[in-house]
Image: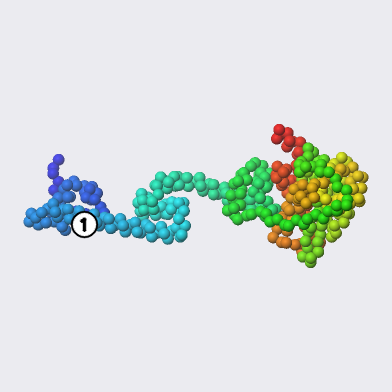
Amino acid sequence: MPRKTYTEEFKRDAVALYENSAGTSIQKIANDLGINRMTLKNWITKYGANSTPHGANTATALSEAERIRQLEKENALLREERDILRKAAKYFGGRDELVIRFRFVDDARKTYSVKRICDVLKFNRSSYYKWKSTAFTREKRLLSDAILGARVKTVFTTHSGCYGAKRIAAELKDQIGYDPANHKRVARIMRSLKLFGYTKKRKVTTTVSDKTKTVFPDLVGRKFTADKPNQLYVGDITYLLIQDGSNMYLATVIDCYSRRLVGFSIADHMRTSLVQDALLMAKGQRGNLKGAIFHSDHGSVYTSHAFQETCKKLGIRQSMGSIGTSADNALAESFNAAMKREVLQDSKTFENQLRCRRDVFRWRTRYDTVRRHSWCRYLAPVVFEERGPAILRSAS
């Protein structure tokens, strides 16, 4: 194979190319030109800017040239690092999350090598590549979350912001026919959408007891459960404040089996007829209350002779907790708090008595037939009573 020969012009051009390529090695320039590394090195010694004429100390000149090139390379790297950090600082915008760093690497990798960017920002390349490889999965999850978020918001709005994560998850399961997400995922999506159910509680007024009237024994012992409907009821009276300073009063009769509001009465007074009407409504709903227990506090209307006579006629046994202990009638207290929280929401009072009656009646109807109750395994009380036997069989 004939030996290659090069003109002096070619040699000088090769040396000039090397000297004007900051940060580039002799080997790379030699490979690009298709010549031997030592050949190019000899040309640099002979024709380079720092070459020593007339046989001067060639080794010293070459060392000085290498030092200059090394300094230029270091300067170039420092400039590059400065540029990367400047661009990263603008990109992050005060947020220095790892995911944002990954996005910056992905956007800047056409300008700088991934290795260089990761070195400057001081994190592992493997973490970036893992983030890159899971991009499709993340996008799919984000799309799924967006679709689920729209459904969650619809349910939340439909129920006037009164549903939390568990009730919304149960509602979605019934709507779709399968469980699209557990309540933890629904809670996460609700937080991202800034959807929060109402949790504000209203002050409960102390019951006015009449110590001169008959007191009945506690037949419940804070065990607000029953094996079937129409066995155990709890009741209470709660105040409903009106803007003009007046009050409305709500008396309730709640079935402990399903938490169903079987009887209720609303009036602008707190006479005995208020609780009698609620009990009579319960009798009309159930047909017969004979043998059932009705548990209440020691309010004067519940210890009155008129109310006792009504209970005797209906075949109801009365039960009462301790005086001044709200826990002994916790189920009724909890119902009152939930009703006020969900009906009033951000308001402190009802606009007027008529609006109060309508809003409470509307909520009561929804409570029994639509609103999902945690006790009823996130079914409405009426639905729970209808499916009760099947639910118990599936649980066993």
| Closer to the camera in the image, 324 or 147 | 324
Residue 147 lies left or right of residue 308; in this view the side is: left
Q: Is any atom of residue 16 visible in this view?
A: yes
Residue closest to the far front:
212
* Image quarter (top left, top right, bottom left or bottom right) of the C terminus: top right
Q: Considering the numbered disc 1 on the image, is that residue within a helix, a strand or a loop?
A: helix
- When the figure is inspected, residue 268 is found, relative to residue 281, above or below; the finding is below
What percent of the width, then of the height, locates residue 197? 66, 53
What percent of the width, then of the height, locates residue 224? 76, 43
The picture quadrant where one finds residue 60 is bottom left
* Image quarter (top left, top right, bottom left or bottom right) of the N terminus: top left
| Closer to the camera in the image, 290 or 35 | 290
Residue type at tag 1? Ile
Q: Is any atom of residue 113 visible in this view?
A: no
What percent of the width, then of the height, locates residue 90? 42, 60
Residue assigned mark 1: 68
Tell me the residue at 48%/47% (across/down).
Answer: 135
| Closer to the camera in the image, 144 or 62 | 62
Residue 158 lies left or right of residue 50; in this view the side is: right
What percent of the width, then of the height, locates residue 296? 82, 48
Tell me the residue at 77%/65% (across/down).
Answer: 243
